[in-house]
Image (spheres, rainbow, N blue to C red):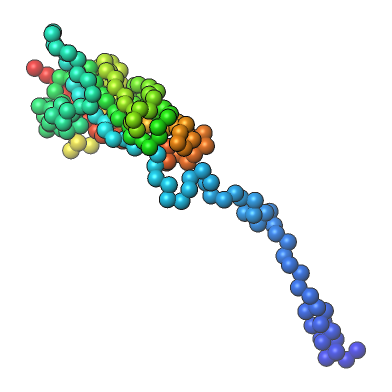
Amino acid sequence: MHPAKVMLAALALGCARSVPATPGPADARLAARPAADASAPSGQPALVKIAAFDCEKYEVFPNEAPPKGLIAPGASIRAWKGGGPYGANWNVEELRCVARASTPCVEGKVLFTLRVGQHVVAERETAVSKGAAEFEVVLPSPIWERGYDSPPKAEALKLPFKTAGFRVQVALDCEAPTKASLRDWNYRFVVADEAFVAGFASGE
């Protein structure tokens, strides 16, 4: 056959039809992937927030009722106005810590977890009432002092007090008006946390 005819025949065979590519394993995985987080609608606000969290030096004197409720601003250990060096809290033994969570949930419960440093020092489950749940605990010094930060190695950071990080986490388990919990919702919609660092010093 003439060379020109051979080339035309090859071109005709090559262009006769186009065969769709068969999806490979990666394409199959993409096709099977479900829609993103059906349990967290676009624009859905968080269902739980921390409305208040603080701790105070706990001292109860004779004939004096123990403190209750949220921490008064002047008693806060997070304010760095505790009378010690650079505002650290002075001669603290027991601590009273309080947290309040707010939520649009009307029937359900909130699990509070309090940490000092890496240590869980208290956990409590509280029923939601009137759009809120509260947690209050008194911590003896051997419990919360386990969470002190390690002494800093840098010479410039060696200070006349110790520090500790306090963190509260709340997890919502709501029954109404929306059923929502960590079992079937995205973490960021049903969990909230807040933290602060406080300083502690002691002496005569």
Q: Residue at x 40, y 32 (%)?
A: 106
Residue 4: x and y in percent read 83, 91
- 187, above or below 173, in the image: below
- 16, above or below 175, in the image: below
- 127, above or below 17, in the image: above
Q: Residue at x 52, y 37 (%)?
A: 184
Residue 29: x and y in percent read 64, 51
Residue 23: x and y in percent read 70, 59
Q: Is residue 86 visible?
A: yes
Q: Is residue 111 visible?
A: no
Residue 167 lies in what quarter of the image? top left
Residue 204: x and y in percent read 8, 17
Residue at the far top in the pictured view: 62
Q: Residue at x 35, y 27 (%)?
A: 129
- Closer to us: 179 or 146: 179
Q: Is residue 161 left or right of residue 125?
A: left
Residue at the far right in the pictured view: 1
- Closer to us: 6 or 195: 195
Quadrant for the N terminus in the image: bottom right
Q: Residue at x 78, y 79 (%)?
A: 15
Q: Is residue 143 left or right of residue 22?
A: left
Q: Is residue 2 left or right of residue 98?
A: right
- Closer to us: 192 or 20: 192
Q: How many marks?
A: 0
- 49, above or below 7, in the image: above
